[in-house]
Image: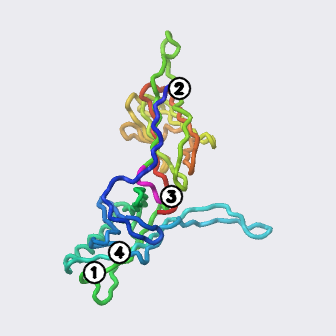
Amino acid sequence: MPLISAPYVPPTGPPSTQPPPIQVPEVGYASITYIDPTGRRWPMTDLSAEWYTLAEGVSGLGAAPYVLTSDQHPRGGARLRHVQPQPRTIVWPVLVKGADHQRFTDNWRSVGKAFTRTLREGPGTLEVARPDGGVRRIAVYYSQGWEGRGQVATGITWDSAVVTLWCEDPYWADAVPVRVHREAGVLADYLVPYPTVSSSQVLGDTTVSNPGDVDVWPEWRITGPAEVITFTREDTGEAFVLDTTATDHGALLAGETATVSTDPPSVRGPGGENWVGGLNWPDATLWSLPPGDTPVTFQLDGAAPGSAVDLTFYPRYEMA
């Protein structure tokens, strides 16, 4: 059966005006920007600006922290039972200055607010851009540290703070998502010249490549027409089924879309309706994609030309 597919495109950094890269501990040469909850970008490695990161004291940008759970072995030693990634803590020293005391005070208050507002308005983002164009990001919350040094001559036209940032997800995410698109082509009439009935179409036995270091939890977007959609991870047999006919809306019509998020689990219909009851609980497994290649299958019952499945995820990495 004819299929329309888009090739895998390796993630690259979005075009932006980044300051020249400088050497940062645990990172190497990079341009680093802090993005506050409002979307404002604060360059952190532009040494010509009135605020920038102090390289000495930066930490927490390396591999994610873990807690290991083990069981004692009767012959000595122990056996690893479980590995649990922990929230990441980043220590971020910042220098702030100004041409005069009022300018310094304005800058000090503005930069400090850009960090502390994460506690009220949602996380900010620390972004690391490499010279090759690659960009990785991590969501951060202010924890503590926006305090001056309290020494002679500080607090007049310059001062520095050592900020602690807390990251609920310890992994860095690529700034550009990986997208996989599978679409139904033109279907032949079924049992011509008899009346056409709802058909089932497998939109390709697809191999999805995760270039990251750890598992990702993808988002799925289904475009109608479609009635029952089955998503199967072939290497493990894990699967989940979305039956749109089990919702108040009924089958997806041509051009309508439904979205399935795997972490946290949610299903939304064309108008934002909660369709989580349309999944085949308790057997549904909203599976993840491990690093490397994974064979998957998308099957749509009630498919027609224009029916499609789009898979989207952001690769996640241990280090910046």
What amino acid is labelled 2 in the image?
A: Ser
Q: Position of residue 110 (x, y in %)?
A: 26, 70
| Coloring applied to the structure | rainbow
Foreground label between 2 and 3: 3
Q: Judge the density around disc 1: few (<14), some (14-19), many (≥20) Cα neighbours within 10 Å.
A: many
Q: Position of residue 218 (x, y in %)?
A: 49, 46
Foreground label between 1 and 2: 1
Residue at screen point 27% across, 75% down: 108
Q: Which residue is mark 2?
A: 200
Asked if one can make out residue 275 in the rendered structure from this viewpoint, the answer is no
Q: Please state if 24 lies on the left or on the right of 299 as rendered.
A: left
Q: Position of residue 309 (x, y in %)?
A: 46, 36
What amino acid is labelled 1 in the image?
A: Trp
Image: magenta residue range: 172-176
Q: Which label number is shown at residue 158?
A: 1
Mark 2 vs mark 3, CA separation in Å:
37 Å
Residue at screen point 47% across, 34% down: 5
Mark 4 vs mark 3, CA separation in Å:
25 Å
Q: Judge the density around disc 4: few (<14), some (14-19), many (≥20) Cα neighbours within 10 Å.
A: many
Upstream in sequence: badge 4 or badge 1: 4
Q: Secondary structure at mark 4?
A: strand
Magenta residues, dominant SS class: strand
Q: Which label number is shown at residue 317?
A: 3
Upstream in sequence: badge 3 or badge 1: 1
Q: Position of residue 102 (x, y in %)?
A: 19, 78
Upstream in sequence: badge 1 or badge 2: 1
Q: Which residue is mark 4?
A: 94
Residue at screen point 34% across, 84% down: 149
Upstream in sequence: badge 2 or badge 4: 4
**Disc 4 + disc 1, Cβ < 8 Å:** no
Mark 1 vs mark 2, CA separation in Å:
68 Å
